[in-house]
Image (cartoon, rainbow, N blue to C red):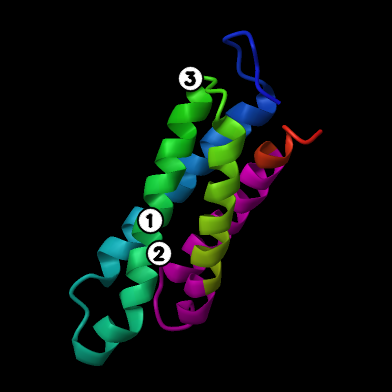
Amino acid sequence: MHQTQQQLSQEMKDCIAACYACAQICNQCSDSMIGLPGAQAEMMQRCIRLCRECADICLQSAAWMSRVSELSERICQLCADVCDLCAEECARHAQHHALCGPCEQECRRCFEACRRMGMAKAA
């Protein structure tokens, strides 16, 4: 539900924190994969792209929630979808890339927080 006052609920503050944490690890994860040799680089291409896209949408979601945008719920729904895709992709690579495991965990945490925020309007 959109806050008419310029006050952030605790749920919004928690979601903003989850978005920032997710963006940070996604950027670290994608940066660490750039420049991998040959076949590894091709294999990780989708993961790099999703991590970057996830970081972008997480930062945008945090910004909109911080401003108490009337569209916060909608961007959080999209953010949850992107976090879910990124988590699934990182899970595929966790055994051979050190940051994919932690990235998957943060993406899942952010997915849950954004899904709750995205559903707030329906409640």
Residue at the extreme top of the image, as rendered: 5
Residue 42, position as x, y percentages in the image: 27, 84
Q: Which residue type carries mark 2?
A: Leu
- Residue 89, labelled with which disc? none
Nearer the observer, 104 or 49: 49
Residue topped by disc 1: 53
Q: Distance between the residues labelled 3 and 2?
A: 26 Å
**Are discs 1 and 2 less than 8 Å apart at CB?**
yes
Residue 113, position as x, y percentages in the image: 65, 43
Residue 22, position as x, y percentages in the image: 47, 49
**Are discs 3 and 1 less than 8 Å apart at CB?**
no
In this rendering, would 112 be left or right of 63? right
Residue topped by disc 3: 67
For residue 7: magenta? Answer: no
In this rendering, would 37 be left or right of 42? left
- In this view, 72 is above or below 26: above
Identified at 39% across, 61% down, the residue is 51
* Prevalent SS, magenta region: helix
For residue 114: magenta? Answer: yes
Q: How far apart are marks 1 and 2 (CA)?
A: 5 Å
Q: What element carries label 1?
A: helix
Q: What element carries label 2?
A: helix
Magenta span covers which residues? 89-116
In this rendering, would 31 be left or right of 85? left
Q: Which tag, 3 or 2, sits closer to the chain's start?
A: 2
Identified at 47% across, 61% down, the residue is 103
- In this view, 38 is above or below 29: below
- In this view, 9 is above or below 60: above
Residue topped by disc 2: 50
- In this view, 38 is above or below 93: below
